């Protein structure tokens, strides 16, 4: 971790992202499991993170860190940390 960066946990980042997406009528979903675990059938189909709109999967294999940075849920001075 760099000294000039503020640490943000994955959970905090995803919660911020969920609030932003909810305003747009979208829901961020995640398959259970830890990174590195063998993916299940559903996870292989839509990815670890995916977005649902009106009950339908609208985005698959979402890179949550990149999306969080794009929509402002993760600021340039913040660094994602996994605990």
Image: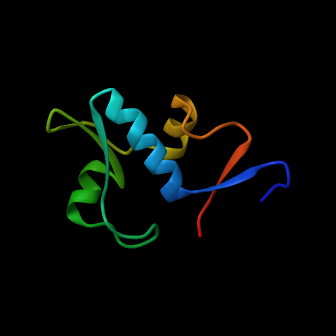
The location of residue 81, given as percent across then percent down, is 63, 60
Residue shown at 35% from the left, 72% from the top: 38
Residue at the limit of the structure toward the bottom, as seen here? 37
Residue shown at 48% from the left, 58% from the top: 11
Residue at the limit of the structure toward the right, as seen here? 3
Q: Is residue 55 left or right of residue 14?
A: left
Residue shown at 33% from the left, 52% from the top: 47
Coloring applied to the structure = rainbow
Residue shown at 29% from the left, 34% from the top: 26
Toward which corner of the image does residue 70 lie, by quadrant?
Answer: top right
Q: Is residue 37 above or below residue 42?
A: below
Q: Is residue 59 left or right of residue 37?
A: left
Quadrant position of the C terminus in the picture? bottom right
Front in this rendered view, residue 12 or 2: 12
Q: Is residue 50 left or right of residue 10?
A: left
Toward which corner of the image does residue 54 lie, by quadrant?
Answer: top left
The location of residue 43, given as percent across then percent down, is 28, 58
Total count of labels: 0
Front in this rendered view, residue 9 or 58: 9
Toward which corner of the image does residue 52 lie, by quadrant?
Answer: top left
The location of residue 71, given as percent across then percent down, is 51, 30
Quadrant position of the N terminus in the picture? bottom right
Residue at the limit of the structure toward the top, as seen here? 24
């Amino acid at each position: 971790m760099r000294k000039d960066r503020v640490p943000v946990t994955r959970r905090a980042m995803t919660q911020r992202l969920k609030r932003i997406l909810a305003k747009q009528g979208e829901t961020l979903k995640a398959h259970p499991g830890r990174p590195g675990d063998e993916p299940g059938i559903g996870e292989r189909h839509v990815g670890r993170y995916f977005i649902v709109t009106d009950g339908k999967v609208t985005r698959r294999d979402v890179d949550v860190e990149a999306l969080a940075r794009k929509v402002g849920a993760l600021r340039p001075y913040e660094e994602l940390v996994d605990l």
